[in-house]
Amino acid sequence: MILEVEGLTKQFGGLAAVSDLKFNVIEGEILGLIGPNGAGKSTVFNLLTGVITPTKGKVSYKGKNITGKRQHEVAKLGIGRTFQLNPLFPNFTVLQNVVASFQLRPSSGFSDTFFNTKKYRDHEKHIQEQSLEILKMVGLYKVRNELANSQPHGYQKMLGIARALAVKPDLLLLDEPIAGMNPDEIDNTLEVIQKTQASGVSIVLVEHNMRIMELCNRVVVINFGQKIAEGTPKEIRENKEVVRAYLGGAYDTER
Amino acid sequence: MSNERISTNISSWNRNYQFIIYAALIVVLALIPVFISSPFIIHICILTLVYIIATTSLRLVMTSGQFPLAHAAFMGIGAYSSAMLSKYWGWSPWLTIPIGAILAMGLGVFIGFPFSKLRTFYYAMVSVFFGAGIVQVIVAFGKYTGGSGGLAGIPTLFGAASKIPYFYFFLALAVVSVLIMYRLEFSRFGLNLKAIDQSYLVAGSIGINEARNRVIVLGIGCFFAGLAGAAYSAYNMGISPTNIDMTATLWLVLYVVVGGMGNFAGPIIGTIFLYMVPQFYRGLKEYTPFLTAALLFIVIFFIPKGIVSLPKLIWQKLKGRKTKREISQ
Amino acid sequence: MTSLSLILTTGVNSIILSSMYILLALGFAFLFSIMGILNFAHGVIYMVSAFLCLKFTLLLGMNPWLALVCTVIIVAIFGVLLERFIFRRFYGDMNGTIVACLGIIAVLQNSVVITEGYVVEKIPEFAHGFMRIGAFSVSWERIVTLLVGVILLVLVLLFINRTKQGQQMQAIAQDTEGAIFQGISIHGIAALACIIAFSLAAVSGSLMGSYLSFSPYMGDNITMKILQILVLGGIGSINGILYAGLILGTLDASLPIFVNAAAAQAIVLFVIVVILLFRPKGLFGREV
């Protein structure tokens, strides 16, 4: 188990956005987290990565309790994520976005940074090389020197993934990675996700789009902040409760 | 292909361009006392150097998305503590100046922690009030600080005979300070600051400790503000609250914004343009502020990104005209 | 002075200061919430009004009340011009607004300094003599200032809450796009708000010029006060302005009895800082 979540609850005033949620992520798998709009999926991510703190519950990562740890601490432990609305560093180029994200491994101390020592310069060179590798893998190498916010939407989302990969995560949380992409971009993204899993990274995916479910090893379905089903993609597709939850919501069974 | 040099400016042509400007500037400045003997002009140059240290450090903090609208007050902390230590306790200004800078830095770090929780607008407002509070405290303890009239009789570094040693002192101080800040800006630290500014959410998700970085940069900014203030008080042999009040801070912000916030050289150019240039029109006497205001309006109406963006603006206008000609043929 | 008359005098001063602060802060809030203008030059407008009123009564020998009316008209027109030619250009651009305001401040302050010199003066009074009740005496001047301030404040509040235009203003302040959809004419209301805001500053300036002594730089303090009131009370809340204005006006009138003026200011400022650190939105604030 790379991630264990128990009793996770978040109250905003009287409203429970997430309520007593329990699920696990097996090391090396792709876990899908699906549910209709407003089910609380992004909130779960925010709770896991320290953007907001849980009202109740426990989150364990690789056996260590990380409940309530702050964003940068969570990132240091090896959890990377993308965001639904995909904020980036708009005034940096595509390449700079990824280079900037290489905070952690390797990371230079303050005096090395300031005095521009050989160690620092070697680190930076290494970081550049790795950034270019990542960009090649996700297919953004060609536009590496363009400003991030001048890129089309699909490219920006891919950049978000590239950025998260720079953290060298062991657990990657992807929040709606293919929303708003055209079919070619979707194919590309799915390929990237598979390659990433093959390199040993565990992944949790939040999505509406059913096609992504096929990639997942297991799926957890939530609605109104609570888990309503769990199982393999096949089991979920045939689950009547899940289908009922989606009727009337923004749901895409095509593709 | 794999050894591309990354710079945090958009084009590396920009960086070489800047380096040449700096080198030329330093050489020219170092030669000034050789050619110009007017103490008044030397004085203006010294003050410009002081403001350059202050505005460059202000901008450094601003790159992290913080608007420390109390910068002049921190200059005041450095100035007054250095002045009082050397005047009342007889310590040498060579010692009290760094102490003043460190005290200013300490106070900056102290408030940096609670302030780091605030976002842009609220941060700005709280800094405004904090800075004003500092000034009022200084005035309130008039018995020691000379109150609103100011403190005089501050011991100096080189005596009162000639301004020339001061000029080289401030030149050296400014060059070293600017170099340090330059190094910080174009290192990974500077990259982190700009990341925090653009999206604190993403910055956190990649492991940047937002609060710690913000406090560090505020401490650095306040250090240089205190340094500039302390050195100034030892040169001027006096310091008064009008040098460090809210209006003073706003003018520092002005120099940065008009010069161009997006560029390291912006504050330097802004200071020269808005502070130094009007001084040479002293003949206008009391009409000088009108000249400054006119310069201000010209810049913000026509060159919104600051003076530093002027070459690019002209280049684009020329390019635009060329294409128009091509189309019309 | 006996302690009773001290309390009464302080009370009178508190009300005067509070009402003036509130009027100025309301004007500023109008400009901000309805037109999106952060008018850092509001204090300077106040100072210029005081200056104009002074000039009209001294140089032209006008009746002070007539001078006040003239000042208000001139300042209101000037405000509309400012908005049309300068503020509109920098709508949404915080840096540009600050720089533009500083330019305006520099020009206006300097004009006054040149015409006036650095001499501080008082404006001839709006009313003469003293009112006496037992051992307590207060100048009619103060009473008049107090009455005008309070009456004006009540009028403004009534306007905001009871008239059609006032409610339209509230609608715009809370949700500009929604207001447009409801068919409210933005330009007309905005112009009205602008006129009211500058007029309030003009009246405050003219009255206060006779209460405090005049200096070309007194606008800076007032702008600072306005910011304190707005941030303490909370952006977007009229109640906030009322309470914050009352608190600050009372503090400014009473603290200087115990400590020197600068210390009083320092105390107020640091207390505000601490409050904001715990409640950044201010006492009643909702959102920016």
Image (spheres, coloured by chain):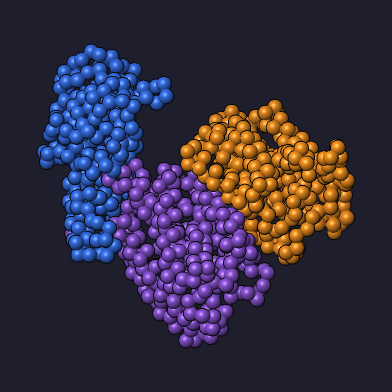
Chain colours: A blue, B purple, C orange
Rendered image quadrant of residue C185: top right
Q: What is the x, y in percent for residue C175?
A: 55, 33
Query: Is C197 placed above or below B172 here?
Result: above
Q: What is the x, y in percent for residue A248?
A: 34, 17
Nearer to the camera, B285 or A149: B285
Residue at the spot 88% in from the left edge and 49% down from the top edge: C63
Residue at the spot 44% in from the left edge and 79% down from the top edge: B168
Q: What is the x, y in percent for residue C203?
A: 75, 45
Residue at the spot 56% in from the left edge and 41% down from the top edge: C231
Query: Is B11 placed above or below A13 here?
Result: below
Nearer to the camera, A94 or B102: B102
Rendered image quadrant of residue C136: top right
- How many marks do you count on the picture? 0
In the rendered view, does B148 fall on the left or right side of A210?
Answer: right
The quarter of the picture where the N terminus of chain C appears is: top right
Residue at the spot 71% in from the left edge and 40% down from the top edge: C14
Rendered image quadrant of residue A10: top left
In the rendered view, does B160 fall on the left or right side of A110?
Answer: right
Residue C183 seen in this snapshot: yes
Q: What is the x, y in percent for residue C271?
A: 55, 43
In the rendered view, does C209 fall on the left or right side of C42?
Answer: right
